[in-house]
Amino acid sequence: MDATPAGPTEPLLDEVTTAVYTVPTDGPEADGTLSWESTTLVVVHVRSGTTTGLGYTYGAPATAQVVADQLAPVITGSCALDVPAANEAMSRAVRNAGRPGLVAGAVSAVDTALWDLKARLLQVPLVRLLGACRTEVPVYGSGGFTTYDAEQQDRQLRSWVDGLGIPRVKIKIGESWGTEDARDRRRITQARRSVGGPAELYVDANGAYTRKQAVRLGEFLAEHRVTWFEEPVSSDDLTGLAQVRAATTADVTAGEYGYTLPYFWHMLGAGAVDCLQVDITRCGGLTVWLRVAALAQAAGLEISGHCAPHLHAHAAAAVPNLRHLEWFHDHVRVEDRFFRGTLDPAGGAVRPGADGAPGHGLTLREAEAEPYRVG
């Protein structure tokens, strides 16, 4: 399937451009299975006449080359309104390049830019184009890296709960591939003390534990009223996720590394999760994100938007089975710095489209971003 050609009075997709920015973190960061000191943002602009749409993903700089070499040629000149056709054309074009991973990030960035462009061409907020299910999107504060000492963790958690009124927060555990179990437990205890009794407390092991290790931790999580156990084992271990889910009271969640629709189908079929995580910057963009939400609803499950909160917000407001959106420390830092039109999470929710701005409302602050540009 090719992207649909534009009719004589329909808007053409005239141009696709990319830029890459690498931003140092505000300190060394790590989770259970990875450490990092910078975040790379790959920005895509798509243009129809004088109207421009914006999308982005977080990933390797080579993502931009995939956009320029493999995606732009198959959609340039097509009808700018037919985003699902463009998504399908891109997905078919990268068959031999390998759809999952970096390539999926490229497709996702272009797809979200195309949806933004369509809403701007029609002069409506993106959530109005999609159709709203809610006016407010709940968020949870996310960070709590394993590199934080007790004071830094406490300060961050209190900034969300006490400072912004966000009643749900998450920390990373599973330090050093699950070999620092005693410190994990201390940090969970400290986190509960920081946020108080009413706030929801979540943990994310990033696949660091073995199956039995995760099950043994489950009782401790219940004692501290932890209600969200993200990737207790590898997200590729669907049998293990299902076993941990059956043995613990916290909701077991995963899905952030889903790059194709069948991935989520298999995860749901395995009974692996209580809530399905979906990342709009990886799964194939807004087009596929909405399809995953429908799969989850058919299975009787909610979904949660993973990271990139400002790019998710309008999509999150458009589905009935949303639980919440991740207000991730690294991405919020970058998005607030680089984009105009970012949202305010005060009170624990954001309100996409409330200002009436067309599209998702984000525009790049080029002068602010330029010092971080690479390539």
Image (spheres, helix red, strand yellow):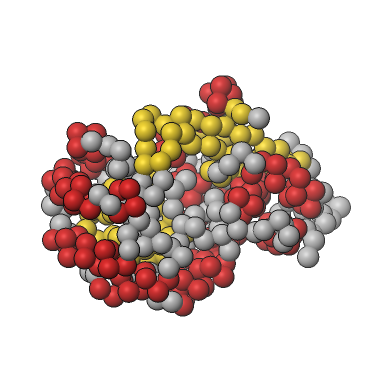
Q: Is residue 300 visible?
A: no
Query: What residue do we see at 42% from left, 71% from top?
Result: 238
Q: Is 329 on the left-hand or right-hand side of 126?
A: left
Residue 69 locus on image (x, y percent): 76, 45
Q: Residue at x 30, y 48 (%)?
A: 175
Q: Is residue 154 above or below residue 33?
A: above
Q: Is residue 336 above or below residue 310?
A: above
Q: Horizontally, is 317 left or right of 112 in the view?
A: left
Q: Quadrant of residue 215?
A: bottom left
Q: Nearer the viewer, residue 200 or 375?
A: 375
Q: Residue at x 30, y 70 (%)?
A: 244
Residue 270, percent from left and from top: 43, 76
State the residue in front, 289 or 267.
267
Quarter of the view holding residue 211: bottom left
180 up-or-down from 214: above or below: above
> Taking 337 as reference, is 109 left or right?
right
Task: Give the residue drawn at x 44%, y 55%.
Answer: 305
